[in-house]
Image (cartoon, rainbow, N blue to C red):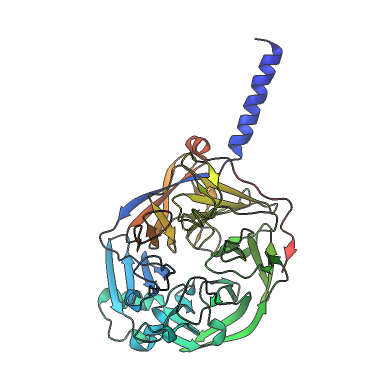
C-alpha cells in the first residue's frame, strides 16, 4: 500500500472519529410501560412525594382544536380531582378538589413549582362558571400553596373530608398568567412569559402577552400567603417585529449556566408574526431579585418548539447542559426519506414522533442533536411531563437535573418516566385524525455515549454565529 494511500485512509479515520465524537452525548429510548391504573391528563401541574405523584389541574381530553363551531375547552373535561399516582405499586388514588378551590385548580396551562414540601400553583386558563358560556372563560389571578406531603397522605389514606387544611390561596392580578413557567433561584421566584387570555378560546385570537419576566418573593407561613419584592424585566430585542419575550407554551426549565451557576432556560414558544415558533433560545441569570436574559439570536432551534416533556441532564466534567425534548409540536420534521424539512402550509407545526436534545456548552454555544432513531412510540409528548426516577443521581440541589457523570457508558439505564400529555394519531389533527389525553406511562432509558447512538443519531445541527451576548 502506498504512503499516500495510507495517509488518505488515516485522514478519513481521523475525520470520522471527529464526526462521531461530535454526536449527542447519549441515546434515549422510550418504551410504553403501563396504562392500566392512571387516567389520561394533559397540561397539568405535578409534584412528587416519596415516589408518588400529585397531579393537579389539566384536561382529560386531547388537543383543543381551533374551530369556531367547537367548544374548545369544555368544562366537562376539566380535571376536577386531585390525583395521586403510585408508580412503584401501580396504584392511583383521587379526591374531589374542595369547592372553594375548585375553579382556580381545575384550570389548564398553569405555572407551577415545587419548593420542598410546597407546590405553588399560579394562574391557568378555564371557566369561572359551571357552564361553557363565552363570558365565563378567563385566565385566573390566583396563587395557591399546596402542602404536598399532607395532601398525598390524606388522599392515599382515604381521609378526604378536610383537604382545605392543606391549601392556601390568594388573589393577585400579577399571577393572571397562562402558558408561562414558574421557577425559583435562591429566595426569588420567576414567572416567565405567558399570556392573559380573557375570553373563550378561538383560533387566530391572541391573548394579552405579559412579555415579562416577573420576579418576587413568596411569603408562606402560619397559613398566610403573600408576594413581596416584586419587579419585572422586559427586553428591547425583537423577532419579526415582536418582543423576544412575546412567548407562551414554551419549554421553561431550571438550568446550569456556562459559568456554573443556577439559572433558567427557555426554548421555543409561540406565536411569531408569521404564526410560527420562536427559534432563539435564551437563558436567565438571577441575582438579588433581578433577572438578566441572554438571547442567542444567532442560533435557530428546529425541533420540538412547543411545551413538551423534557429531560434535563448536566455534565459537571465537561460543564455542558442538555435539555432533551420529547416530541410535542415541532417546526422542522422528517419526510418519508428521513430528511429534515421545514414546516409548511401542507404540514404546519405538526405533532412529532421524535425527540431532540439542545445542548449548551461551557463556552456558551448551542448545538441541537435531533434523534431520528430510535423514534418515539407515537405522536406523544405535547403538554406531558418527564418524571425523574426515584433514586436517580441528580446534580447539586436540583432534583430535576440528572448528573451525566453517574451514567454508566454504553449501558441503557432507566432514568425516569413520561406521564400524561396529548397523543395524536397523525401529524395534523382533524375530525378523521383525533387526539386524546395520553394515559400510557412510558419508561425512559438513557445510553451514554454508545456506539449504537453514534450510528443512529444524525449529525448535530449548529446554527451559532456568535456567543449569546444579547442582554435583556
Whether residue 88 is situated above or below residue 95 in the rendered picture? above
Choose top left, top right, bottom left or bottom right for residue 119: bottom left
**Picture mark count:** 0
Question: What's the residue at 43%, 46% (across, down)?
Answer: 375
Q: Can residue 68 be seen at all in this image of the molecule?
A: yes
x, y (%) of residue 168?
44, 86
Question: What's the residue at 46%, 53% (across, down)?
Answer: 352
Quarter of the image where the C terminus is located: bottom right
Whether residue 224 is situated above or below residue 431 in the rendered picture? below
Question: What's the residue at 51%, 79% (across, down)?
Answer: 197
Q: Can residue 388 be seen at all in this image of the molecule?
A: no
- 226 with respect to 29 (left or right): right
- 256 with respect to 156 (left or right): right
Residue found at the far top of this picture: 1
Question: What's the residue at 62%, 66% (across, down)?
Answer: 273
x, y (%) of residue 180?
54, 72
Quarter of the image where the N terminus is located: top right
Q: Nearer the viewer, residue 436 or 402?
A: 436
Q: Nearer the viewer, residue 373 or 385?
A: 373
x, y (%) of residue 126?
42, 79
Whether residue 352 is situated above or below residue 227 in the rendered picture? above
Choose top left, top right, bottom left or bottom right for residue 89: bottom left
Amino acid at each position: 500500500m502506498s504512503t499516500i494511500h495510507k495517509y488518505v485512509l488515516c485522514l478519513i479515520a481521523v475525520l470520522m472519529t471527529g464526526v462521531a465524537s461530535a454526536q449527542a452525548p447519549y441515546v434515549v429510548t422510550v418504551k410504553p410501560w403501563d396504562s392500566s391504573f392512571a387516567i389520561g391528563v394533559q397540561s397539568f401541574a405535578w409534584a412528587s412525594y416519596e415516589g408518588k405523584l400529585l397531579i393537579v389541574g389539566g384536561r382529560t381530553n386531547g388537543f383543543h382544536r381551533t374551530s369556531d363551531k367547537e367548544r374548545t375547552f369544555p368544562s366537562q373535561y376539566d380535571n376536577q380531582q386531585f390525583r395521586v399516582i403510585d408508580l412503584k405499586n401501580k396504584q392511583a388514588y383521587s379526591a374531589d378538589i374542595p369547592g372553594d378551590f375548585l375553579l382556580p385548580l381545575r384550570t389548564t396551562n398553569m405555572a407551577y413549582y415545587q419548593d420542598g414540601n410546597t407546590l405553588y400553583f399560579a394562574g391557568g386558563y378555564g371557566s369561572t362558571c359551571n357552564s361553557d358560556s363565552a363570558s365565563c372563560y378567563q385566565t385566573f389571578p390566583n396563587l395557591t400553596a399546596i402542602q404536598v406531603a399532607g395532601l398525598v397522605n390524606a388522599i392515599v389514606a382515604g381521609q378526604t373530608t378536610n383537604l382545605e387544611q392543606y391549601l392556601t390561596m390568594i388573589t393577585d392580578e400579577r399571577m393572571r398568567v397562562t402558558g408561562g413557567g414558574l421557577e425559583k433561584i435562591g429566595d426569588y421566584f420567576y414567572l416567565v412569559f405567558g399570556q392573559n387570555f380573557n375570553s373563550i378560546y378561538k383560533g387566530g385570537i391572541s391573548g394579552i402577552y405579559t412579555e415579562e419576566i416577573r420576579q418576587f418573593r413568596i411569603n408562606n407561613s402560619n397559613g398566610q400567603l403573600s408576594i413581596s419584592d416584586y419587579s419585572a424585566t422586559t427586553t428591547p430585542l425583537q423577532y419579526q417585529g415582536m418582543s423576544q419575550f412575546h412567548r407562551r407554551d414554551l419549554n421553561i426549565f431550571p438550568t446550569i449556566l456556562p459559568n456554573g451557576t443556577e439559572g433558567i432556560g427557555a426554548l421555543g414558544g409561540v406565536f411569531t408574526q408569521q404564526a410560527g415558533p420562536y427559534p432563539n433560545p435564551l437563558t436567565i441569570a438571577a441575582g438579588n431579585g433581578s433577572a438578566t436574559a441572554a438571547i442567542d439570536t444567532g442560533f435557530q432551534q428546529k425541533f420540538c418548539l412547543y411545551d413538551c416533556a423534557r429531560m434535563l441532564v448536566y455534565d459537571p466534567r465537561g460543564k455542558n447542559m442538555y435539555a432533551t425534548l420529547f416530541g410535542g409540536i415541532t417546526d422542522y420534521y422528517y419526510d418519508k426519506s428521513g430528511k429534515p424539512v421545514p414546516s409548511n402550509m401542507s404540514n404546519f407545526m405538526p405533532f412529532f414522533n421524535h425527540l431532540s436534545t439542545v445542548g449548551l456548552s461551557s463556552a456558551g454555544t448551542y448545538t441541537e442533536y435531533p434523534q431520528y432513531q430510535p423514534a418515539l412510540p407515537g405522536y406523544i409528548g405535547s403538554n406531558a411531563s418527564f418524571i425523574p426516577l426515584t433514586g436517580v443521581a441528580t446534580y447539586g440541589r436540583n432534583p430535576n437535573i440528572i448528573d451525566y457523570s453517574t451514567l454508566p457508558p454504553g449501558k441503557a439505564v432507566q432514568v425516569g418516566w413520561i406521564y400524561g400529555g396529548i397523543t395524536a394519531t397523525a401529524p395534523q389533527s382533524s375530525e378523521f385524525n383525533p387526539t386524546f389525553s395520553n394515559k400510557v406511562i412510558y419508561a425512559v432509558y438513557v445510553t451514554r455515549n454508545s456506539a449504537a447512538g453514534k450510528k443512529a443519531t444524525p449529525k448535530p445541527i449548529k446554527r451559532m454565529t456568535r456567543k449569546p451576548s444579547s442582554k435583556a
